[in-house]
Amino acid sequence: MSENESHYHSKKDRIFLRSIQGHYNLGAELARLRALPRVRKGKEIKFVDGPQAYSRHYVEPKDGITQTLHLHLEEYGPGGKSQKHGHVNEAAFYILDGTGYEIHDGVRYDWQAGDVAIVHNNCVHQHFNADSTKPARALVFKTKPMYLFMNMLFQKMVETRSSEPAPGGENFTAREGEDDLNHAK
């Protein structure tokens, strides 16, 4: 480094860190979490979205019930598909019923009931029900709240959910009040 060169200004590979600040008291947070319900009644949580892809959010960041998990059920109507999107957090889809496939960064991955589909970080993806007569369901686990906490949640919508049903799914509605909770229908 020359005599007139500033170490600060000449250094191009600097790393800047931002402190995580705010009120956080472990004792208070544990008391808050322990005061929250430990069981959420699935029948009280309704599906949203549609008509091709529906979601039922059991635990999500806005609830404040957990610090690291987001859990929801996805239901894809006959021939239905989700929005095409990407996000920084990973997701695991446990396929409860049906057959379908994913498109991850342009690559197709087929799945059926009993499989687990993994969506990696920063992957542009979309979920599809391959059956034009039967619905498909997946239980989805995400670490989204942790990414929110670390201020690292970046999401991009590439294609929104369709507002029209897929051919074959014109009269389909999400299975809200089913009796077979093993999802074998």
Image (spheres, rainbow, N blue to C red):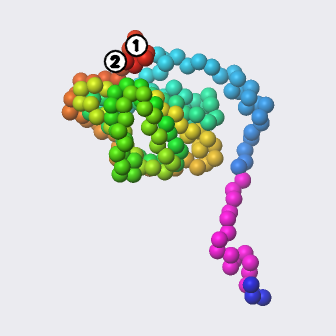
**Is 9 within the magenta?**
yes
Q: Quadrant of the N terminus?
A: bottom right
- For the residues labelled 1 and 2, the Cα–Cα distance comes to 8 Å
Residue 8, quarter of the rendered image:
bottom right
Q: Secondary structure at mark 1?
A: loop
Residue positioned most to the bottom: 3
Q: Residues within 10 Å of mark 2 (few under 14, many from 20)?
A: few
Q: Quadrant of the C terminus?
A: top left
Residue positioned most to the top: 179
**Is 160 within the magenta?**
no
The chief SS type of the magenta part is: loop
Q: Which residues are magenta?
A: 5-19
* Residue at the spot 54% in from the left edge and 33% down from the top edge: 70
Residue 139, given in percent of the width and then of the height, sits at: 46, 29
Number of the label disc, if any, that sits on residue 185: 2
Instruction: Report which residue position mark 1 lands on.
Output: 180
* Residue at the spot 34% in from the left edge and 27% down from the top edge: 98
Identity of the amino acid at label 2? Answer: Lys
Residue 129, given in percent of the width and then of the height, sits at: 31, 34
